[in-house]
Image: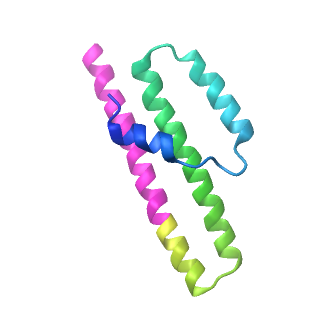
Amino acid sequence: MVTEVHKTIAMTLPQAPFGAPHDARAKHLMQRVKTKGLREPLEAVQTILNQNRNLAYEISVNQRMPTIESLTHSNLLIQHYDGNLKQIVGIYKQMGEEAQKML
């Protein structure tokens, strides 16, 4: 259900700079999910969301000092953010397809 790419992403993404309370709550919720088939994709989504929180923070910092370099860098970060959202949509779509097969 979860591809190797999702597992690699989950292992290599940095944590959000202000994510400690969010991470603890997410970890608690993940412990309540008993099936591996649901837990792995949800963990991948949470990891991607944590990365997007970092990206949003960095974009915000770059906007405070609007130089050509920082704005160009922000543009690349926004593209990465968008790609992450597309990955999340793909994971949820895959989960929905798996749920339909079970019905």
- Residue at figure coordinates x 73%, y 48% from the top left: 18
Please state the horizontal and vertical placement of residue 4, each as a whole percent of the image.
33, 37
- Residue at figure coordinates x 62%, y 85% from the top left: 67
User: Where the C terminus falls, by quadrant?
Assistant: top left
Q: Is residue 16 magenta?
A: no
Please state the horizontal and vertical placement of residue 96, each as a whole percent of the image.
34, 28
Occupied quadrant, residue 89: top left
Please state the horizontal and vertical placement of residue 65, each as a whole percent of the image.
69, 80
* Magenta stretch: helix, strand or loop mostly: helix
Up/down of 52 relative to 74, above or below: above
Q: Is residue 59 left or right of residue 85?
A: right
- Residue at figure coordinates x 39%, y 40% from the top left: 6
Q: Is residue 88 magenta?
A: yes
Please state the horizontal and vertical placement of residue 100, each as a whole percent of the image.
28, 21
Up/down of 31 relative to 49, above or below: above
Q: Is residue 85 left or right of residue 25?
A: left
Up/down of 89 relative to 52, above or below: above
Occupied quadrant, residue 8: top left
- Residue at figure coordinates x 44%, y 64% from the top left: 79
Viewer-closest of 19 and 86: 19
Residue range of the region highlighted in magenta in the rendering: 78-103
Occupied quadrant, residue 71: bottom right
Viewer-closest of 11 and 39: 11
